[in-house]
Amino acid sequence: MTDAQPVESPAVPPPAKRQPEPVIDIVRLSHSFKSLRALNKVSFRVLQGQLHGFVGPNGAGKTTTLKIVCTLLAPQSGNVRVFGHDVVDQRKKVRSRMGFMPDEFSTYRQMTVYEYLDFFGAAYGLGLSDRNRILKDVLSLTDMDGRKDDYIDGLSRGMQQRVSLARVLVNDPDLLLLDEPASGLDPRARIELMEILRELRMMGKTIFISSHILSELADLCDSVTIIDRGQIRYSGSMRGLLSQDKEHPTFRVTPANEDPDIEEIVGAFTGVLGVEQIDAQDEYRVTVDPQQLDADGLLQALLDAGISIDSFGKERRHLNQAFLDLTQRGIPS
């Protein structure tokens, strides 16, 4: 009789990493105003905890999308869910978890800052003691403590934007929808507003910002959706947008000293399609075929030729160029 051999248990694969639930989930959303097709089968997602930029030219469909997401406009076709709730059938549940900041501060200008925020706190059903506590917090967060007794009508555009943001925060929403929040602000006010938004993201808020200026969101957003003429041109990470290359990517080569042979050496290398000197500087843009180029070999060939190199690397696409590549010229009709 032989000893029983131990039986190995089958390997159990590790549990799949759970993806964050989408806070905003838009599927094939379409909407028209008479003959104008504002949105055409738009689909994208915003994940929990993201600071997501929604970028497009004027008239691209950004404000229409925002109004549908915040339940101010019913979609004509498609499906829109916020925290899993349908924006048409479950409007109250959607509204209870979001705050919407429009691009214009148009009402209640004759109130003081504190009166304005207190009014909205009461409208949300907050008791007096809760309002006093919450208003103290939001005034501190937006750095408006010292202006709480000022009339809104006498505040600058930047200060009014802060008050508008403070109003959005009164009911402690999980999702912030901001329509052109930096529009009309001077550079300092814009930078200070962006710092407040970074702090809100660190507090766990999901922030969805509509803007027609991609560059002002570059250092702020985790992800971005670009819309043009009612259609999505890109939706994903900011890093992915910058790494999207054209058919033939480019390298930038900066020699440490002037060398008349560099164009000849680089141009003769396998996989190099073209070499151009950049604006009479000692820099060269090298267009390549990525399937044939041996980048390490090219760098070594330059060094072997006695050419010292200050920089050598793949050229990243500039944000403005990315935007131009993905959108069309002119005004949509």
Image (tube, grey):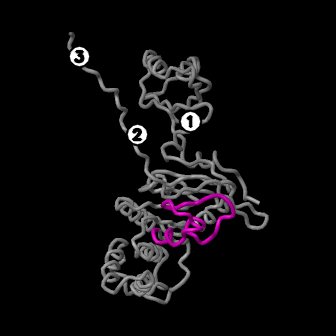
Q: Is residue 278 above or below residue 295?
A: below
Earlier sequence position, callout 2 versus callout 3 = 3
Amino acid at circle 3: Ala
Earlier sequence position, callout 1 versus callout 2 = 2
Residue tagged 3: 4
Work out which residue is located at the far front of the displayed protein and give it. 1
Judging from the image, what secondary structure is the residue with disc 1 in?
loop
Please identify, in this view, whether the residue under mark 1 or under mark 2 is nearer the observer.
2
In this image, 185 relative to 144: left or right?
right
Identify the residue at image location x=44%, y=87%.
151
Q: Say if the magenta span includes residue 18.
A: no
Q: Quadrant of the N terminus?
A: top left
Q: Are marks 1 and 2 in contact (CB under 8 Å)?
A: no
Residue tagged 2: 16
Q: Position of residue 296 (x, y in %)?
A: 45, 21
Q: Position of residue 118 (x, y in %)?
A: 40, 85
Q: Is residue 125 above or below residue 59?
A: below
Label total for image? 3
Residue tagged 1: 278
Q: Hey, which quadrant is residue 18 in on the image?
A: top left
How far, Cα to Cα, is label 2 from label 3?
35 Å
Q: Quadrant of the C terminus?
A: bottom right
Amino acid at circle 2: Ala
Earlier sequence position, callout 3 versus callout 1 = 3
Q: Nearer the viewer, residue 121 or 4?
A: 4
Judging from the image, what secondary structure is the residue with disc 2 in?
loop
Q: Are marks 2 and 3 in contact (CB under 8 Å)?
A: no
Q: Position of residue 272 (x, y in %)?
A: 58, 22
Number of other residues with Cα within 10 Å of mark 2, as a class: few under 14, some 14 to 19, many 20 or more: few
Work out which residue is located at the far bottom of the displayed protein and give it. 110
How far, Cα to Cα, is label 1 from label 2?
48 Å
